[in-house]
Image (cartoon, helix red, strand yellow):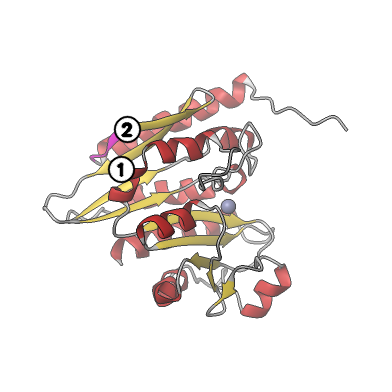
Amino acid sequence: MIESVNVITKEAEIKYIHFTNLTTSLLKNRGFQFKELGTDHNFPIILATKKALISNAKKKLIIADAHGNENLSVYGLLSYLLTESLPLDQTVSLICCLNPTGHILRTRLDFDKLNSNRGYSEKDDHKSNATRAILANQYLIFDLAQDGLLTLHEDPDAGNAYIYTQDKDMAQEARELINKVVTPDLKIASKKQLYGLDVVDPNDKVFDNCVIIEGSNESLERWIYEKQGIKCFTGEIPGKLGVSPQTRINAHKALISAFIRQ
Ligand SMILES: [Zn+2]
């Protein structure tokens, strides 16, 4: 069998550059500063940070668009920035697009068919450009996420929202976060639905219907938790047909807003 080769068209590249220019201007206007963590086939992976005005402020990190076919998360992030004010007493950092080539191709994996959310253990040789960028800046990432990490995902097979966290001590906070996405058009999952969808890895444990305690794997969140004990939450917004894009964008925004207020 011949493996298909990814192609980035000039048109898709221009669209992405235009999109990132708009995002950067918005963040600049909101007082963010930028650092390039690495590149994914010449597309920069950017960390944006808005420093608190007080010392000893809480520091939180939000990462969107790790999987390119789940990219309504970045629109939820932009919608949050356009309509809500960031707290002055927190240092908030954002990686708006962890997987630029996946975003352009609208694929879960990147151009090299690698997963931006895996490969964080030392033994894994198949590291994506995003994984390498995070690992190269790990002490900065640990510092900026010291009071919490929120990663934004969508599950294309799910009709209801759920959330991953790393330890049962964080389950209550995870539950409170995911409760905030509930609207008349979007519900949170029941345990039965999660098992029905087969989303649960044998190492994972469903703790409280829609809260999954992630088992050992090589995910970004598991790695940060195991290395530093940082609180991590991974929102899974339903991507199934029938849940409108606007509802999904609003759900990401609600999750971000709740995490910042936490
Ligand atoms: Zn995902």
Point 51% across, 66% down: residue: 164
Quarter of the image with the N terminus is top right
- In space, the residues marked 2 and 1 are separated at their CA atoms by 11 Å
**Which portion, as a residue range, is magenta?**
31-35
Q: Nearer the viewer, mark 2 or mark 1?
A: 1
Looking at the image, residue 177 lies above or below residue 86? below
Q: Which amino acid type corresponds to the residue marked 1 in the rendered image? A: Leu
- Measuring from the top left, give residue 233's x and y in whole percent: 44, 62
Q: Which residue is mark 1?
A: 140
**Picture mark count:** 2
Q: Is residue 253 magenta?
A: no
Looking at the image, residue 118 lies above or below residue 23? below
**Tag 2: Cα neighbours inside 10 Å, few (<14), some, or many (≥20)?**
few
Query: In the rendered view, does 245 fall on the left or right side of 50?
Result: right
Q: Which amino acid type corresponds to the residue marked 2 in the rendered image? A: Lys
Labels 2 & 1 near each other (Cβ < 8 A): yes
Point 48% across, 51% down: residue: 220
Q: Which residue is mark 2?
A: 35
Foreground of the two, 192 or 219: 219
Outermost residue toward the front?
123
Point 31% across, 46% down: residue: 93
Which of pointers 2 and 1 lies earlier in the amino acid sequence?
2
Foreground of the two, 248 or 135: 135
Element carrying mark 1: helix
- Measuring from the top left, give residue 169's x and y in whole percent: 40, 76
Quarter of the image with the C terminus is bottom left
Query: In the rendered view, does 121 fall on the left or right side of 48?
Result: right
